[in-house]
Structures are given as structure tokens and as C-alpha cells.
Amino acid sequence: MQHLLFIGYYDCGYEKLFIPLRRKFAIVMKKTFLLLSLLLFLMPAIGQSQNDLVFGPVDVMPEFPGGQRALFQFLSDNVKYPPLSVQREEEGRVIVEFIVEKNGSVDSVAVARSSGYDALDREAMRVVGLMPKWSPGKMRGETVRVKYTMPVNFRLPKEKDAYKAK
């Protein structure tokens, strides 16, 4: 009778495997993995209404009033190089991310990648927070919240006295 219990029992060299039990375990593990994957995928959407979702790339991306050229002009007019950073000759690029709300206002400004200098990071966040309302992004014809990422570059001029005159 003992041979009936071990149907599918075979010797594979170093170890012995019980095939039916191993298959059941594999099926249970696959189902558990699929269930956990589904839960992790749906978790961010649980508890959020459609109005709270923030989109990345959308059909119509948000635009600064006046376009890219006006955005660069706004940044150059409003960035005030921190005096301590001028003394220390700190330069760099700060990658700033923010959300353009449905009404076009800028919200949730954060540093995505630092320049390595706190003063430059704070100045980039300050200037982005000053931005006027953008034209909002659209997805399938509906106005949506959009996450936007952009660089703010800090470069000192070659002439050393350029900032002392201002």
C-alpha cells in the first residue's frame, strides 16, 4: 500500500521530489503572486477620485503663457543668484518637478534632482513657485492635473564683477 502514496515519486540524482505536491504548491504560488500583483497595481487608485489623479504625459501638455521662449525669459528675469553661491562659485543644474493644476496654477514644487548646493535648490523652487498660471493639460478633451519636470540652470558669467554691479 505504501507504493500508492508515492505515485510520481522519482529519484533525480541528489534529491527526491514528490510531483503532485510540488505542482499544487506551484499553482498556489502563481495564484498568490497574481493576486498580490493585482493589488499592488490597483493600490494607488484606491481612495483616489478621478479628480485627484496626476498624469504624466497627456494628449495636450500644459504650456507656460507665451510658450517656451517666455518661460526662459521668466526664469532669467526672476532667478536671483544667491550671494553666498556667487562667493563660493557654485554652479549646477536643478531638476524641479511640480504639478500644473486643472486651473493652471503651479503646486507641489519639489526638487527631483539636486545640484548639490542647497541655496541653488531653494532658489529654483522659489522661482518655480512664482510662476503665473499655465494653460492646463488635457487628456481626452478633459482638463487634468499634470506632473511637469524642468531644469533650472545656474551658471556664473565669465566676468567676476558681473554680479557685484547689480
Image: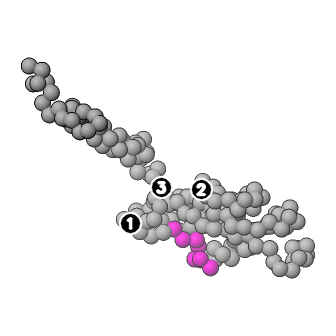
The residue that appears at 48% across and 69% down in the rendered structure is 61
| Residue 81, horizontal then vertical, whole percent | 80, 67
Q: CA distance from mark 2 to mark 3?
A: 12 Å
Residue sitting nearer the eye, 37 or 118: 37
**Which structural element holds mark 3?**
strand
Which residue corresponds to mark 2? 107
Q: Is the residue marked by circle 3 packed among few (<14), some (14-19), or many (20+) residues within 10 Å?
A: some
Disc marking residue 141 = 1
- Amino acid type of the residue that numbered disc 3 sits on in the rendered structure: Val
Question: How many angstroms separate mark 1 from mark 3 (CA)?
Answer: 16 Å
Main secondary-structure element of the magenta-colored stretch: loop
Quarter of the image that includes the N terminus: top left
Amino acid on which the number 2 mark rests in the picture: Asp
Circle 2 packing at 10 Å, graded few (<14), some (14-19), many (20+), is some
Mark 2 or mark 3: whose residue is earlier in sequence = 3
Image side of residue 161 versus residue 4, left or right = right
Crowd tier of the residue under label 1, counting other residues whose Cα lies within 10 Å: few below 14, some 14–19, many 20 or above = few
Extreme residue toward the front, this view: 13
Q: Quadrant of residue 143?
A: bottom left
- Residue at image x 59%, y 60%? 97
Q: Which residue is mark 3?
A: 54
Give the residues in magenta: 62-69
